[in-house]
Image (cartoon, rainbow, N blue to C red):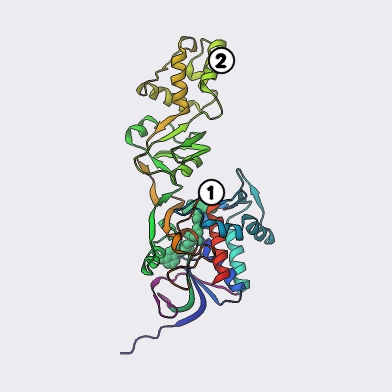
Amino acid sequence: MAEPHKSLVTVDTLILGAGAAGLMCAMQAAQRGKSTLVLDHAKQAGKKILISGGGRCNFTNLHTSPENFLSENPHFCKSALSRYTQWDFLELVNKHGIPWHEKTLGQLFCDDSAKDIVQMLLRECKSAGAKVQLRTEILSVDYDHGYRVRTSEGDFEAKSLVIATGGLSMPKLGATPLGYQIAEQFGHRIVPVRAGLVPFTLHDHDKAAYEELPGVATEVIAENQRTAFKEAMLFTHRGLSGPAMLQISSYWFPGESLEVNLLPHLDVSDLLKTARQETPKATVASCLAKHLPKRLVQALQTQSETRGVPWQHKALGDISNVEIEKISKYLHSWSVKPNGTEGYRTAEVTLGGVDVNQVSSKTMESQLQPGLYFIGEVLDVTGWLGGYNFQWAWSSGWVAGQSV
Ligand SMILES: Cc1cc2nc3c(=O)[nH]c(=O)nc-3n(C[C@H](O)[C@H](O)[C@H](O)COP(=O)(O)OP(=O)(O)OC[C@H]3O[C@@H](n4cnc5c(N)ncnc54)[C@H](O)[C@@H]3O)c2cc1C
């Protein structure tokens, strides 16, 4: 019996992944006159964009610089970030009349909806002539003087193949390891991957100690031997979250402790000594509750005994300078040892990925395999929380789009 006819489509540039990086690359390549097709297995393009930033997409950060990224080679991101900057992306957003605002720390969000960003990218692709084909399973990739990609919807041939399949975070949204598998197939090394920008889970004894605290948030400095972040920390049912914890999770390895300054704006020692003079009958807890959430003060007070800093029900007038210094140290360097993270299920990003030392920082083209490109999160480049990861997707997608 004859084999059923399979369609074969030939284009200049084939892009796998209709996410942030893939769509940016597609519109650039098509604007340069390349016939361009984006394939994705999802039903919708830009799914992560749509849910990002609580539905408002934190699409870039005004202060983007190479220091905001983690990679085995921290210099790699410099070229792309300087060739397509946050200001370039903002110009595109403004060209489409999308209303936006700055929240904090240079983070730019849509006023209305993340849909505006996806529609903008799709409109740019369409007007440049780039096509986006969804619901297409990638079955295999081969190279013989060009790339041939077999899919559930037929075969595709292209001179340039761009891998924009993202990382492993949120498998529910369609994340798969396809990009890493293709990279390995062509001899690329993968820097070990792990979840980043992810909430911490706590050991049972800590969870029990802080069981009354889910929903409590406070401004802290979260610190380890590698870095420090001054942002909010949030107690959850499973452990610790909030921007400070998400940020430091990217710099954390299993088994390590974190130091948290619970009162970064105050000198607790000065505070308690002054209060002791002015209101000696008041308790330590009531004094601290003016500066920290009350439920947190209660939990810390209960814990203070096991940490060797008992202040239970003590009046300020009854505590010595030595005790004040102990309480101060306890609150300025509250130590917590997570038992892990929530993993890819809730992580915003994947750390590690395609080793950037085998990829051109100017074009994102493989140095091992001509015509093969890697862009966005699949590469070993990971941004901080705050719009940096999308900026990396835009910048890396843009430079590849100039070269394919
Ligand atoms: C909940 C959440 C919120 C976030 N919020 C922000 C934010 O506000 N600001 C910010 O800067 N970053 C944010 N991020 C991170 C940001 O979304 C990513 O870094 C960015 O989307 C990466 O772009 P990308 O194009 O490389 O990958 P993606 O956007 O993940 O796109 C990859 C595409 O490849 C497709 N794909 C994957 N595997 C296959 C396969 N086997 N076959 C076919 N197609 C495949 C996927 O369907 C997807 O469309 C957030 C992430 C999450 C999970």
Q: Secondary structure at mark 1?
A: helix
Mark 1: few, some, or many residues within 10 Å (few <14, many ≥20)? some
The image position of residue 279, as x and y in percent, is 55, 11
Indicate whether 307 appears above or below 40. above
Q: Which residues are magenta?
A: 129-154
Say whether residue 368 is visible: yes
Circle number at residue 274: 2
Q: Image quarter for residue 147?
A: bottom left
Amino acid type, label 1 = Asn
Indicate if the residue with disc 2 has its beta carbon within 8 Å of ligand 1. Answer: no
Mark 2: few, some, or many residues within 10 Å (few <14, many ≥20)? few
| Residue 256 magenta | no
Circle number at residue 38: none
Residue at image coords 41%, 17% = 312
Say whether residue 295 is visible: no
Residue at image coords 38%, 69% = 186
Question: According to the image, label 1 marks what residue?
Answer: 68
Q: Secondary structure at mark 2?
A: helix
Number of marks in the image? 2
